Amino acid sequence: MNIAFDHMTLSQRVLFGTGKAVEHVTAAVEDLGARRLLLIHGTLNTQVVEAIAERTGVVHLIDEIVQHVPAANVAAATADAVAADADAVISIGGGSSTGLAKAVALRTGIPIIAVPTTFAGSEATDIWGITEGRRKNTGADPCVLPKVVVYDASLTSGLPRALAVASGLNAVAHAVDGLWAPRADPINRAFGTEGLRALVPGLRSLVANPDDIQAREQMLFGAYLAALAFASAGSGLHHKICHTLGGAFNLPHAEMHSILLPYVTDFNAPFARDAENRIVSALGCLSAAAGLNTLRNELGATPSLADIGLRETDIDNAAELALPLVPASNPRPVTLPDLRRIIRAAWAGEPILGAEQ
Ligand code: NAD
C-alpha cells in the first residue's frame, strides 16, 4: 500500500514524572523567563498549588472554574490577567481549568504551562472552546497550545473513581474518533492506536486498584497520545455530537463522551474497517462497538445520557443542532434520522448488539 499524507505536528515540551510537579513547573517557568504568573486551578491539590505559587512569581490566583468555559468567566479572568500584568499562565486541574487558561491566552497571547489532573487531554491541543448562551464556540489557534505540559500522576489520585473512569473513557474517545476524523493520517492513527494500548489496560488496572500509580502514569501517557491524535486528526462525528450536547444542554463532558462513544462506533465501524481492527486489537474483543460497551460496563461507567440529565424531549433538537456539524468525510453518510437514532440509543443506554469478547 502506498503511503501519502499531509501531517502537522504541534510543538510543546512535555515533562513527565510522578511527584515532580513543583520541580517541573518551576523549571518551566524559568525556561520561559516568566516573572508574573497567573495561576488558574480547581480547588484541589492545595499543597501543590501553594508550593508552586511560592516558588514561582504568582501574582494572581483564580480558583473559580466552571465547566465548558462560560464567556463571562473568560472576560473576568482576562481582566484579572491584564490588571495583574501577567506574562504567563499556569493551569492546574482538569480540562475546564486548561480551557480557561486557553481562553485567557487567546485574548492576551501569554503562554501556558499546563498541569493536567484528569485524562481530558486538552493540554495537548491547540483547540479552545468558549460557551456563550447555549452554544459552545470552538476554534484552533497556535497561541492556546500550552508551551509546557507537566504530568504528575500523583495529582490524579484525588479523582473519584467515577470521574477517573469517565475521564479515561473521554481519552479513549479521542483515540477512537481520531481514527476516522477529517484529517486522520498514518501518524495520528499511530498515536491513537498506541494511546488505546496504554489506556485500556491502564483503566482496567486503575479500577482494580486505585492506588496503582503505574496505572495512573499509563493513563496520563495514553491520554496524551490520544489527545495528540485528536489534535492532529480533528473532530470526528463523535466529538461533533458531544460538542453539540455539551454546549446546548450543559451535560458533563467526560461522562457524555464515555456514554456516546460505543453508539457512534456502532454506527461508523462497519464503514471503517481499519479503525475497527485497531480498536478490536487494543480491546482484545471481537467487535469494536460491543467491546467498547463491554469495557464501559466492566468499569461501571454511567450508562445513559438520561442519567446525566438529557431529557427525551431534547433528542430531536440535539440531532438537528448536530447535523450541520457532521464532517463531510465521515466514513458513513449521516442523516438526521441517523443522528436521532444514535442520540436516542445513548439516551436510553440501549445494549449494543454484536460479538462481545
Ligand atoms: P473538569 O476539568 O470540568 O473537571 C471535572 C471535575 O473534576 C471538577 O469538579 C474538577 O474540580 C474535578 N477534578 C479535576 N481533577 C481532579 C483531581 N485530580 N482530583 C479531584 N477532583 C478533580 O473535567 P474534564 O473532563 O477534565 O474537562 C472537561 C472540559 O475540558 C470540557 O469543557 C471540555 O470541552 C474540555 N476539553 C477540551 C479539549 C480541547 O482540546 N480543547 C479536550 C478535552 C476536553
Image (cartoon, helix red, strand yellow):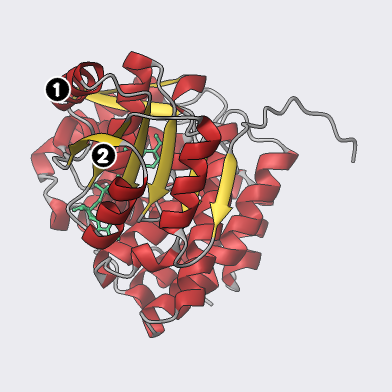
Q: Tell me the quadrant of the picture where the N terminus can be found.
A: top right
Q: Is residue 158 above or below residue 327?
A: below
- Residue designated by label 1: 76
Q: Callout 1: few (<14), some (14-19), or many (20+) C-alpha neighbours within 10 Å? A: few
Near-viewer residue (142 or 284): 142
Q: Position of residue 51 (x, y in %)?
A: 31, 55
Query: On the rendered structure, is 62 left or right of 165?
Result: left
Residue at 27% across, 71% down = 161
Whether disc 2's CB lies below 8 Å from ligand 1 is answered: no
Q: Is residue 177 visible?
A: no
42 up-or-down from 140: above or below: below
Tell me the distance, in whole angstroms, between the alpha carbons under discs 1 and 2. 12 Å
Query: In terms of depth relative to the viewer, which is nearer, 51 or 322?
Result: 51
Q: Secondary structure at mark 2?
A: strand
Assign a secondary structure to mark 1: helix
Residue 1 is tagged as: none
Q: Relative to 164, is 179 on the left or the right?
A: right
Type of residue at label 2? Answer: Ile
State left or right for residue 311 relative to residue 230.
left
Neighbourhood count class around disc 2 (C-alpha, 10 Å): few under 14, some 14–19, many 20 upward: many
In the picture, which quadrant includes the C terminus?
bottom right
User: Which disc is residue 40 wearing?
Assistant: 2
Q: Amino acid under label 1?
A: Ala
Q: Position of residue 6 (x, y in %)?
A: 74, 25
**Residue 211 percent location from the top left of the image:** 38, 82
Image height of 34 relative to 180, above or below:
above
Residue at the image point whose x is 64% and y is 35% from the top: 184
- Earlier sequence position, callout 1 versus callout 2: 2
